Amino acid sequence: MIGVFDSGSGGLMVLRAIREELPDADLLYFGDLAHAPYGEKSRAELFEVVTNAVAELRRAGATCVVSACNTASTVLQGNYPELLGLPRDRFVEMIEPTVARAAALKQPLLLAATPATIASGVYQSALNAAGVVAKSVALPGLAAAIEFGAPEEELENRIRDAFLEIDTAVYGGLVLACTHYLLARSTFERVFPKLVVLDPTRTVSKRVRETFGRTERGGGAVRFRASADVSLFRRRVRAMFGPDTPIEADTWSGRESDKIEG
Ligand code: DGL
């Protein structure tokens, strides 16, 4: 079973793409809404919530894990064995495939991500190592605004404010390096009609197929858990995966209240 996690709804886009790539794989999605947004947390706080999310997926029976969250991926990069108790080939994260995809775009690029992702410097190092010229831009509050259903106008204003001092005309494209931003892709495209907006989801889901495709053949079940019951998350899951999709929420501590069999 492949465990997939994010702070909330952003990773659902990745999950849907994985589903298309691997229709027979059994998938378990964990939305850590009780701790959203990840992107405004300190490194120490992030370390704790991310390791807990991965541990919960493992306890629930996941034999491989996808971090469908760029912010979480910045913590997990370089620490796979200690944090996951998983061999490296049982784990897929966002950064490496996103950078590989970005390398194919016309440069220089803009890269939009959460404040925690930008502060980590992990993307910038990976881009430099791949020879990709990019300017990283943090968008404070945007992931939470998307997660909890802020009006379109607020999303637009947050995007405009973050890019206020940047001459976007000199850039060849904009990489969305936060899975929540994928849910607002059309807003980015409206604000920057001349920029090519890169959604790395397909590259990541292909990487998941290449990495787990041979071993992960099951009945094609998709299950959902969330650490808090948020109605907009429920609505998004049901819009994307079917109106009757059950979601276990609120009580998932991984201990006595854990109803997952793995
Ligand atoms: N979706 C996550 C990411 O890709 C983080 C959003 C958040 O919780 O701040 O970075």
Image (spheres, rainbow, N blue to C red):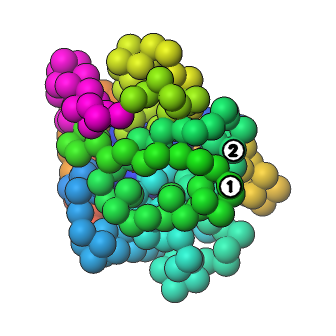
Mark in front: 1 vs 2: 1
Left or right placement of residue 45 versus residue 85 in this view: left
Report the span colored magenta. 144-166
Q: Amino acid at mark 2?
A: Ala
- For the image, the number of numbered tags is 2
Going 55% across and 64% down the picture, which residue do you hit? Answer: 125
Q: Secondary structure at mark 2?
A: loop
Q: Secondary structure at mark 1?
A: loop
Q: Earlier in the sequence, mark 1 or mark 2?
A: 2
Label 1 and label 2: CA atoms lie apart by: 8 Å
Task: Judge whether residue 103 can be spotted in this image.
Answer: yes
Q: Amino acid at mark 1?
A: Gly
Left or right placement of residue 189 versus residue 14 in this view: left
Front residue of this view, candidates 59 and 240: 240
Residue under label 2, please give it.
Answer: 103
Quadrant of the drawing holding the N terminus = bottom right
Front residue of this view, candidates 212 and 248: 212
Residue under label 1, please give it.
Answer: 131
Q: Position of residue 119 (x, y in %)?
A: 34, 62
Q: Magenta part mainly helix, strand or loop? A: helix
Q: Position of residue 139 (x, y in %)?
A: 29, 42
